[in-house]
Image (cartoon, helix red, strand yellow):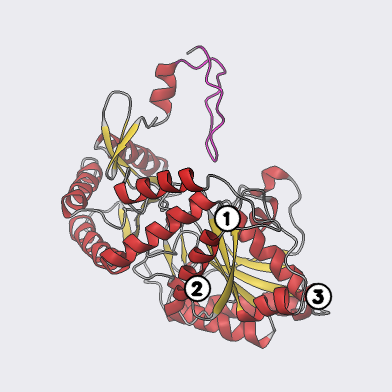
Amino acid sequence: MSRYYVVHPFTTMPKKSNLTEEEVNNRFFMANKGERHWVLNKDDQAFLNLSNAAYSLDQSNEIILKAIFEQYNKLSASIMVNQGHWIANNLAEKLLNLAPKFSSVFYSNDGTGAMESALKATRQYFVENDMPNKQKFISLNGGYHGSSMGALSITNLGFEGVFGDLLQGCISVPSPEDFREKEDELDDRHAKQAAYELEQAILKAGPETVAAFVIEPVQSVNGIRVFPNLYFQLVRQITRRYNILVIADEITTGIGRTGEWLTSSSLKLDPDIITISKGLTAGYFPLGATLFSSQITNHLIENGSGFPHGTTLSGHPVGCSIAIKVLEIFEKENLPFRAKEAGEYIMNELREGLNKENIIREVRGKGLMIGIELNIDSEEEIERFNTIKSNIKKSGILATFSHNVISLYPPLNISKSDMDYMIDALKSSILLIG
């Protein structure tokens, strides 16, 4: 191989155009095949893949593979523009059973597409209800909501400016985490401070101009940030006061990942729109879904002419068939509950083994979204973090690293033996330099 042609997403690429195959393999983990929750490179070195919430089940699951082959043989492709197929409706019915307040589903190709759909539907809702000035979106510092120009405009992680001017009228406000001192436990004080800042931002922008508040029930890319329940209750009170919709970004947290089918359901957030992707197909096929409340649905359909938005292959029959099987597996094996129990076990074991280490600030999470935050304040500690990252990969673990946090997304049906391997590997990787 004389040259590597692929530009990887969200990746600092090597400053060299003629990479050899060996250099590519050294730079990136290159998957060759998968076995249950493990992925192997071309040398058959195995790694437990905890790097993305999309991997909610095992690789090459026989039930899902059978559904894929059967669907491709029966109906391999279909569009939803003035056409359709009943598989999309079957999936929608299953999703709406998880969210009784909601009454319609719009499909997209991924999580970014699901969020873009939510933003457009929100704008349309207010324009057609004679409130055309309600166009602004508010989101939290540290939130990640997608990579299209619209979704990126409400993302607040510091890299958005590289694309120039984004969507106008997007406002970033502090999260409860922004008010936390280094040694603090996150609590209701921080929730009240953040809620106050949200209301002040609404008043400053003009409530008549603000369309929606967008929030992840647990921040993912920003290092698994879990906010007090009170914050979500206060958010809903404030947004109702000013006729502002709430969009719950459950692209990562949805479909059992946090121990609940939908995380927002237990938070009294009561969103108007929910976006779902990642675990919906367990990574087997790109698919996103945007759930609309009855209020939004009635406007778009009963009182309107529809939603003039979409992509060619959204609601693909194979993707919908996979999602149906994923949900059936989750139901049969009670995986949301198992995720809750597994997450508690993993976090308790990690805390017991690591909390005495000076480099550890906190082990936190919800269900099988787990973050290990390190104390990184100096050049020496940054170097230690780099060593830890290297140790983790050498130990056979694929994780995600953001800022000073090791983020972990174990599959929801992970075995006890794999959990214990993961715990031991992480402990040893950190303690080696502790």
Residue 10 sits inside the magenta stretch: yes
Q: Nearer the viewer, residue 362 or 335?
A: 335
Q: Nearer the viewer, residue 83 or 12?
A: 83
> Which residue is at 39% across, 62% downward?
327
Q: What amino acid is found at the position of numbered circle 1 in the picture?
A: Gly
Q: Residues within 10 Å of mark 1 (few under 14, many from 20)?
A: many
- The quadrant holding residue 373 is bottom left
Q: Position of residue 13 (x, y in %)?
A: 54, 29
> Which residue is at 55% across, 75% downward?
194
Residue 415 visible here: yes
Residues marked 3 and 1 touching at CB (< 8 Å): no
In the displayed structure, would residue 96 be above or below residue 411?
Answer: below
* First to last magenta residue range: 2-20
Q: Residues within 10 Å of mark 3 (few under 14, many from 20)?
A: few
Report helix, strand or loop for mark 1: loop
Give the numbered dot on residue 96.
2
Report helix, strand or loop for mark 2: helix
Q: Nearer the viewer, mark 3 or mark 1?
A: 1
Give the residue at mark 3: 128
Q: What amino acid is found at the position of numbered circle 2 in the picture?
A: Leu
The Cα–Cα distance between marks 2 and 1, rounded to whole angstroms, is 16 Å
- The quadrant holding residue 245 is bottom right
- The quadrant holding residue 6 is top right
The Cα–Cα distance between marks 3 and 1, rounded to whole angstroms, is 26 Å
The reply, left or right, for residue 265 in relation to residue 348 is right
Q: Earlier in the sequence, mark 2 or mark 3?
A: 2
Q: What amino acid is found at the position of numbered circle 3 in the picture?
A: Glu
Give the residue at mark 1: 315
Magenta segment, prevailing SS (helix, strand or loop): loop
In the displayed structure, would residue 42 be above or below residue 314?
Answer: above
